[in-house]
Image: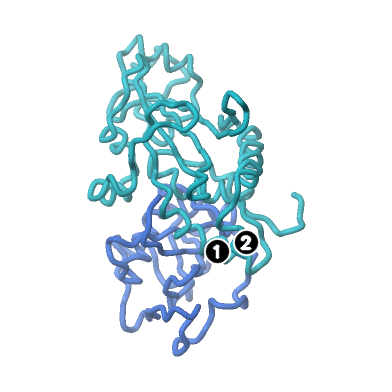
Amino acid sequence: MAEESESGLQLPPSTAAEGEGPTEVSPETATPEPPSSAAVSPGTEEPAGDTKKKIDVLLKAVGDTPIMKTKKWAVERTRTIQGLIDFIKKFLKLVASEQLFIYVNQSFAPSPDQEVGTLYECFGSDGKLVLHYCKSQAWG
Amino acid sequence: MEEDEFFGEKTFQHFCAEFIKHSQEIGDGWEWRTSKDCSEGYMCKIHFQIKPGMLMSPPGTSAHVQTCLPMEEALELPLDDFEKTETTTGSKVIKYEYHVLYSCSYQVPVLYFRASFLDGRPLALKDIWEGTHECYKTRLLQEPWDTITQQEHPILGQPFFVLHPCKTNEFMTPVLKNSRKINRSVNYITSWLSVVGPVVGLNLPLSYARTASQDEGNVN
């Protein structure tokens, strides 16, 4: 499984990543407003554990998708993939015509109503769930 | 270097074979079918769903039928249960067919699908859209013909709806490139189908995710 030290994903804010000049969105300038109360929050102090309600999710950008300044989030177990997609789209300020996909195992898109808790149980390791996200203009 | 994004019929068949192998392991119902002269082949899956909003059967009549299943879950019950349900309660059962073919012109897989009632009446596209997940509905309803068209099935010669393949590479390429960077191979079919399937009501069970990608040189 890819670790955080792999190329392309951890460049400092002043450098353009992937050569395409994606926008770095930082929480200070674009405070995330989750659609529902505290379902997703920055995962700095929340411990993730199997018995806790929230899951530590590490979000990694693919392609020329903008990199989120905050990559680690504590997400409720029952949050769906679709909910996470909506959240990231808002956070990254994607326009309506842009699609966002989330992948587990870097290659498989779970169904939109799949729950984060289930995904963690199947694909979590080291107390966290790594999800890759990728934006696309396209369909089909 | 660009080979992974565009692949030939052989690679397509290889990925389909791997996909079907897993499908058989979990009883997901995908099959391989060939044209009459066996020169071409495609993957096929049929499943049945209850039209949303309808009770499947009054409690007590059928022990293995649950009431008010969300659409996406009503997938795995055997055929004869549905036939009994349909006749006793008048619930609408819909037969969905999904075919995965290879497009020579686009050099990518293409998803063909159609739906009909058990008596053979085909469903209109707008009824199929009602089965589409909320998140895709808005976009599909705005520009339906950009993404879904009706075409003749290249092998069966019957009308099917088709998820247009012209933009497939746009969303597949970043995923493939990303995996190549870290020496992982991706089953193109598994990955692609996991993305496009939900648009037309086809959800892949999560266990496919393990087979979607693996370290090069590793045999699991």
Q: Is residue A50 visible?
A: no
| Foreground residue among A48 and A31 | A31
- Residue at image point 66% right, 61% down: B184
Q: Which residue is mark 2?
A: A125
Considering the numbered disc 1 on the image, is that residue within a helix, a strand or a loop? strand
| Foreground residue among B110 and A134 | B110
Say which chain tag 1 marks. Answer: A
Q: Is residue B167 left or right of residue A47?
A: left
Amino acid type, callout 1: Val
Considering the numbered disc 2 on the image, is that residue within a helix, a strand or a loop? loop
Q: State the hue of chain A.
A: blue
Question: Marks 1 and 2: in contact by CB < 8 Å?
Answer: yes
- Residue at image point 48% right, 71% down: A72
Is B27 above or below relative to A125? Answer: above
Image mark for residue B49: none
Q: Residue furthest top?
A: B88
Q: Position of residue B212 (x, y in %)?
A: 60, 50
Q: Residue furthest left?
A: B142
Q: Position of residue A126 (x, y in %)?
A: 63, 65
Q: Position of residue B131 (x, y in %)?
A: 33, 37
Is A111 above or below relative to A90? Answer: above
Q: Quadrant of residue B198?
A: top left
Q: Which residue is mark 1?
A: A130
The chain coloured cyan is B
- Residue at image point 47% right, 26% down: B156
Say which chain tag 2 marks. Answer: A
